[in-house]
């Protein structure tokens, strides 16, 4: 019997999945009790890199961060484990926030960019390790397992998490970076709660 292809999910359904993955990994990494997070879901044109799955930004010396998820990517009907990998990667940037702050406060130009690239790759690697350590080497979501068992699958149907490519899961954007034009104290930073599209998702939780 040939397994059916992945059902197409609505943007609202994918948004709910991403929101829960961010909450779960923020709690797992201890970020939920230290940071105020703000989630927004935008098209690629609203990101620094339109091809990035997600971007995270924060202002130096503040424990409030904004995560933007690229809804254009959702048209590819991503599987849960790919969405979870992206969410874990973005939360992982906050675990490394002190190193990112040091890089942006003490270096500039080519050296800063090279260090940023290394930190980005390092975050991608160790968050993947964390996922394997948490779930096991053979972990796949039900959508991946179904697709892998299908003789009808095509390259367009195969989720990136199944192929195991090492590409970037997200991207860091710093408010104090020369490539951004935002204020060092953006509106979301002053609101003091986790929000998504102007709706409170879950509040900052004190440890």
Image: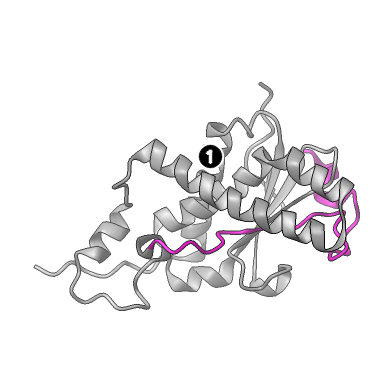
User: Seen from this angle, which residue lies furthest top?
Assistant: 207
Q: Is residue 191 left or right of residue 205?
A: right
In percent of width and height, residue 86 lies at: 53, 55
Q: Position of residue 32 (x, y in %)?
A: 63, 33
Observer able to see residue 98: yes
| Residue drawn where x is 72% and y is 55% of the image | 116
Q: Which residue is mark 1?
A: 25
Visual colour scheme: one colour
Q: Residue placed at 47% from the left, 40% from the top?
A: 130
Q: From the top left corner, tell me how far across and down residue 16 is, in percent.
A: 51, 52
Q: Dot 1, how many residues are within 10 Å of its Cα: few (below 14), some (14-19), or many (20+)? A: many
Q: Residue at x 37, y 65 (%)?
A: 163
Magenta run includes residue 98: no
Choose top left, top right, bottom left or bottom right for residue 201.
top right
Q: Position of residue 125 (x, y in %)?
A: 52, 50
As drawn, 148 above or below 142: below
Quadrant (top left, top right, bottom left, bottom right) of the N terminus: bottom left
Task: Tell me the magenta residue range.
Answer: 164-193
* Placement of the C terminus among the 4 image quadrants: top right
Residue 40 in view of the camera: no
Q: Residue 134 falls in which quadrant of the image? A: top left
């Amino acid at each position: 019997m040939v397994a059916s292809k992945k059902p197409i999910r609505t943007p609202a359904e994918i948004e709910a999945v991403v929101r829960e993955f961010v909450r779960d990994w923020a709690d797992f990494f201890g970020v939920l009790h230290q940071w105020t997070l703000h989630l927004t879901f935008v098209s690629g044109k609203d990101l620094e890199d339109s091809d990035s799955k997600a971007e995270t930004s924060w202002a130096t010396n503040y424990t409030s961060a904004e995560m933007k998820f690229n809804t254009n990517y959702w048209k590819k009907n991503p599987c849960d484990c790919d969405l979870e990998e992206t969410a874990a990667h973005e939360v992982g940037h906050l675990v490394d926030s002190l190193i990112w702050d040091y890089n942006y406060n003490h270096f500039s130009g080519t050296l800063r960019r090279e260090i940023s690239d290394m930190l980005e790759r390092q975050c991608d690697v160790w968050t993947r390790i964390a996922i394997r350590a948490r779930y096991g080497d053979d972990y796949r979501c039900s959508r991946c397992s179904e697709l892998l068992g299908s003789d009808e699958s095509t390259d367009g149907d195969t989720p990136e998490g199944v192929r195991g490519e090492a590409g970037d899961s997200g991207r860091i954007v710093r408010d104090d970076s020369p490539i951004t034009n935002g204020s060092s104290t953006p509106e979301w930073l002053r609101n003091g709660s986790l929000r998504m599209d102007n709706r409170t998702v879950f509040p900052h939780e004190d440890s």
